Amino acid sequence: MTQPVLQLTDLHYRWPGREGFALSVPGFSVVAGESVLLLGESGSGKSTLLSLICGTVKADRGLVQVVGQDLAALSGSGRDRFRAEQIGVIFQQFNLLPFGSVADNILLPLRFAPARRKRAGVVKDTARALCQALGLPDALFQAKAGMLSVGQQQRVAVARALIGQPPLIIADEPTSALDANSQAAFLDLLFRQSEAQKSALLMVSHDPRLGERFDRVVDLSDVAGITRGAA
Ligand SMILES: Nc1ncnc2c1ncn2[C@@H]1O[C@H](COP(=O)(O)OP(=O)(O)OP(=O)(O)O)[C@@H](O)[C@H]1O
């Protein structure tokens, strides 16, 4: 059987000092190369779950395993290194370094991830090739990321997540600020590239219209117990 790229088991989390919200996931997995859309309304805990999966937030109970590694068994800095190696992240607001060039931004995760850097080969050439595949003009390769249009920033964010072929790509509502045409174009690029390099893709969104492209669409409330009381 294919080993899951992501396996959550009996996971439980409550934000410290916040009695109102709790998230528990008895079991959820994503297998190699699979694309999964996780749907949930605003405040249902999608970003919290992604933080648990990325290891930026530590579960109160239960297991988060990424390519078989239990994240809780790693130290804080160990988790940071592990994330850089194994997970490509596309944030809602892209989180590019505005004063860094396009090249700097794309190459950033490789700094902390020697195995991923090795997989990326000649890293500048690979970054350029990704830009080309994503329709980002070569003339922008050394441009400051803060000078780019939103659509161009998205492409940089996708290239940064994909470089070095991490087995898992996580995307947090990356299309929420886009009109329908731009959304479709963005998803085309993301799917084409993540399929080409066989990365699994887990995207969270509140928008069910995105679902048709994914191998699987999961409602967060079907896989998670969510407590939402007064904050
Ligand atoms: N850093 C934090 N500290 C304390 N509580 C938080 C923090 N981040 C989120 N929460 C709380 O956790 C709950 C779930 O929030 P979360 O951002 O995970 O939901 P979401 O489904 O991603 O929402 P949205 O679609 O609006 O981004 C909310 O009650 C929120 O206030």
Image (spheres, rainbow, N blue to C red):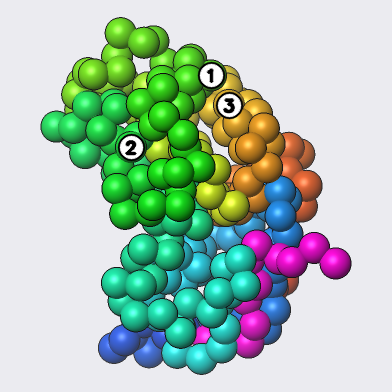
The residue singled out by tag 2 in the image is 107
The residue singled out by tag 3 in the image is 189
Is 6 covered by the magenta stretch?
A: yes
Q: Which quadrant of the structure image shows residue 141?
A: top left
| Residue under the image location 29 percent in, 27 percent down | 103
Contact flag, marks 1 and 3 (Cβ < 8 Å): yes
In the rendered structure, which segment of residues is drawn in magenta? 1-12
Q: Tell which tag, 1 or 3, sits nearer the viewer.
A: 1
Q: Which quadrant of the structure image shows residue 102?
A: top left
C-alpha separation, residue under disc 1 versus residue under disc 3: 8 Å
Q: Is mark 2 within 8 Å of ligand 1?
A: no
Q: Is residue 135 above or below residue 36?
A: above
Q: Is residue 98 above or below residue 110?
A: above
Amino acid type at mark 3: Leu
Q: Tell which tag, 2 or 3, sits nearer the viewer.
A: 2
Residue 32, horizontal then vertical, whole percent? 71, 55
Mark 2 surroundings within 10 Å by alpha-carbon count, few (fewer than 14), some (14 through 19), many (20 or more): many
The residue singled out by tag 1 in the image is 133
C-alpha separation, residue under disc 2 versus residue under disc 3: 19 Å
Q: Is residue 7 above or below residue 200?
A: below
